[in-house]
Each structure stands twice: as structure tokens, then as C-alpha cells.
Amino acid sequence: MIYFDYAATCPLDDEAAIAYVKTATEYYGNSKSLHDVGSAANELLENCRKELAKLLHVEDNGIYFTSGGSESNYLAIMSLLSAKQKEGKHIITGLAEHSSVKGTFEKLESSGYEVTYLPFNQDGLIDLDNLRSHVKSDTVLISIQTVNPEIGSIQPIKEIGEICREEEILFHSDFVQGFGKVNLESPLEYLDSFSLSGHKIFGPKGIGAVYISPDIPWQPYYKNASHEKGLRPGTLNVPAIAAMTVAAQKCYTRLNQDAEHYRRLRKTFIKELQPISSKIILYDLPELLQLPSTLGMRIKGLEGQWVMLECNRVGYALSTGSACQSGMDTPSKTMKAMGVADKDAKEFIRISLGRDTSQEDVKGLAHALKNMVTM
Ligand SMILES: Cc1ncc(COP(=O)(O)O)c(C=O)c1O
């Protein structure tokens, strides 16, 4: 089986796996224990925090480890709302946010918040004028993903951040699909919080982190939470944190080289699909707006679910969109946010590339798709 679903999850990197085993066997203490075994684990933990902060160009006292991107999103949103800069109950977010963000806002709606869900423009981007037109005097929070998980569009984080600063609105971004993949040193400066996850960058599953600016005086969501300065309870998974940190160091070291690899693969794939270009719709943006490893497309008249199963039959693993939606037979959230009709949105498939994806692999997949069109 050739894997084209790296945006859903990645295999564990070999060096990250070694770090995991070494930490789990040699630094197994509870990082909160006061004896030397605990202190050794804690020292390693704090080194990881510092290293991640360095990679992200943020202060290490704003980094909190969590169980993954979903929990990070939840905790970030609840923490920011506990430290609102002004009175108000209005929130702005996007229509294509991950279920962990959407679910949090739906819950907040039932407790009296008003949430505006912004659509995308035809390129899969948040329209800044539209966003600005929805800002009200009682808007307290904006939450927009950095990179869309289905088509890889990179949102205008800096520009949204500027609006937030002008209007004294707190700004969270789900950075899960951008972490380790895009260099966002300067846009990240505009965020009050952002979330990341280990398993999208060849780290372990079930581990992640959230950055909350040390300037935000958040109140704990959980009562008496004993870890991570009261942000969350639960013994920290130091082995997974060490492995995620190793995976992240590797991603940032190879960022440009990997991006170039993905761009070449993408180019080949699109070129190979040329003979059926009239039958397909590709979501492909200019370089600065596009995560090169994620490619969304539709084959006119063919349901994505059918294409995915047919690809699986001939040895290719791809998806019909974000993993949290697969199996739900709902049209792609991103397509819906872009105004694509339900029937057409169901044609959506996502191809996501990894370090081991080869030119032969993408040519093979393109060949399989061409066969389906001419079947
Ligand atoms: C954009 C985005 N946010 C959040 C998540 C959730 O991350 P995790 O699986 O670590 O909870 C995902 C994973 O699918 C994602 O793609």
C-alpha cells in the first residue's frame, strides 16, 4: 500500500522512536515527583519545552504540553475567554475549522456566546474585508486555522492579527497542519495562542502542545489541576514529549528541503493528470499561500468515497478529507466553506505527501486516477 494520507497522520520517525524508548526506559519518573528520578524526567521535560519554544520563536513559559491538537484547541479557547480584554460575548471563526474548534464554539453558543462562522473565498482563504465587516464592539475572540487540513491553503494570519490588535480582540490559531511545515516566525507573533500536535510531524500520537502568550492572565479551566501550571491535570507523557521534540527538530531542520521535495512531487502529479484536466478540479494556490504537501481535488461526476475505495483496491491510501470527517458521509467542510454545492463537495479527495513519497508513487497514483476517469 502506498500511503498518501500524511495530513491525517504520519508514521513515527526512527529517531523519534529511539528518543521515546530511551525516555520511557531511562527517564520514567513522574516529572512532578520531587526525588531524583522525577527530577531527571523534569529536567528532560523542561529542555524539550525550551527547544520547542526556540523552534517556534516564542517564550518557553508560554508552552504547555497536552494530549494533542484537539485538547490544545479547547484549552486555548477556554483560557483566552477566561482572560478577555473587554466585555463581550461575540466570537468569529471559520466554517472549515477542525471539529475540536467547531465543537468548542458550539458548546459556547449554548452558554450564551454568539459565534460568527466565516466562509472561505474561492481560493479557500478567509476574506479580510468580510472578516472586518463582522467585527463588532463586543467581539472578544477570533479563531482561524493557520493551514487548512483539506486543501492546504495558508490563511492570512498576520493580517488577521493586525485587525485583532487594532480592535483589542484575542486571537487563537489551530496551527496543527502548519507546525513543522511552514515557516511562520513573524505571523506567529500576532497570535495570543496556537495549538500543535505530534503525529502530523512524524512524532507520536496522543501528544501535542499549546502556546498561550505569557501576557494572558488566564484562569484555569480545571479545578486544582496539578500539572502544567494548572492548565491541565494528568501526568505528563514525557517519552512522547521527547519524541515529538526530536521529530520537530528534524522537521524544522529539513523544512526547506522537504518543501522543495513536495513541490516537485506536486508538479509531477499535476502534469501527469494533464490528459484528464478537463475532468478534474485541482485546488492549487501560489507558493506562498499553499502548503505543498497537501493537495485537494475533485473528479467531476465521481464520488470521493468511491475514488478513495477504488484507490485502496489498487494499492493507494488517500482520503476524502479531514480524518475527523471520514466515514461520516458528509461533504467536505472546506468545499462547503468555499460555497461548493453538497453533491459536488462529495467529489472531494485529498492527497497528502510525506518524506518517503517518491516520483514513482505520484505517477502511479495519477495513472490510477486516469484509469478511473476512463473506466
Ligand atoms: C487542523 C487540525 N486541527 C486539530 C487536529 C487534531 O489533532 P490531534 O489529532 O492531535 O488531536 C487535526 C488532526 O486531524 C487537524 O488536522
Image (cartoon, helix red, strand yellow):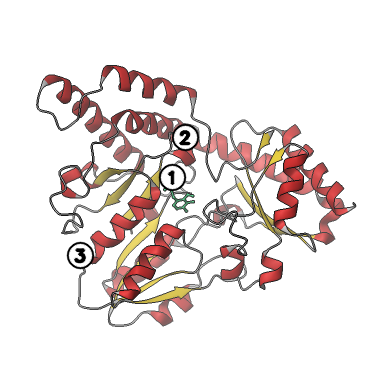
Which structural element holds mark 3?
loop
Q: Is residue 83 left or right of residue 367?
A: left
Q: Is residue 366 left or right of residue 26?
A: right
Marks 2/1 in contact by CB < 8 Å: the verdict is: yes
Q: Nearer the viewer, mark 3 or mark 2?
A: 3
Q: Earlier in the sequence, mark 3 or mark 2?
A: 3
From the top left corner, tell me how far across and down residue 14 is, in percent: 48, 23
Up-down: is 257 above or below 276? Answer: above
At label 2, the amino acid type is: Cys
At label 1, the amino acid type is: Phe
From the top left corner, tell me how far across and down residue 42 is, in percent: 19, 29
At label 3, the amino acid type is: Ser
From the top left corner, tell me how far across and down residue 365 is, in percent: 76, 41
From the top left corner, tell me how far across and down residue 274 is, in percent: 83, 51
Q: In the image, is the residue at mark 1 within 8 Å of ligand 1 by its beta carbon? A: no
Residue at the spot 20% in from the left edge and 75% down from the top edge: 86
Q: CA distance from mark 3 to mark 1?
A: 26 Å
Q: In the image, is the residue at mark 3 within 8 Å of ligand 1 by its beta carbon? A: no
Q: Which mark is residue 82?
A: 3
Q: Earlier in the sequence, mark 3 or mark 1?
A: 3
Pointer 1 residue: 179
Which structural element holds mark 1?
loop
Residue at the spot 27% in from the left edge and 61% down from the top edge: 78
Q: Which mark is residue 251?
A: 2
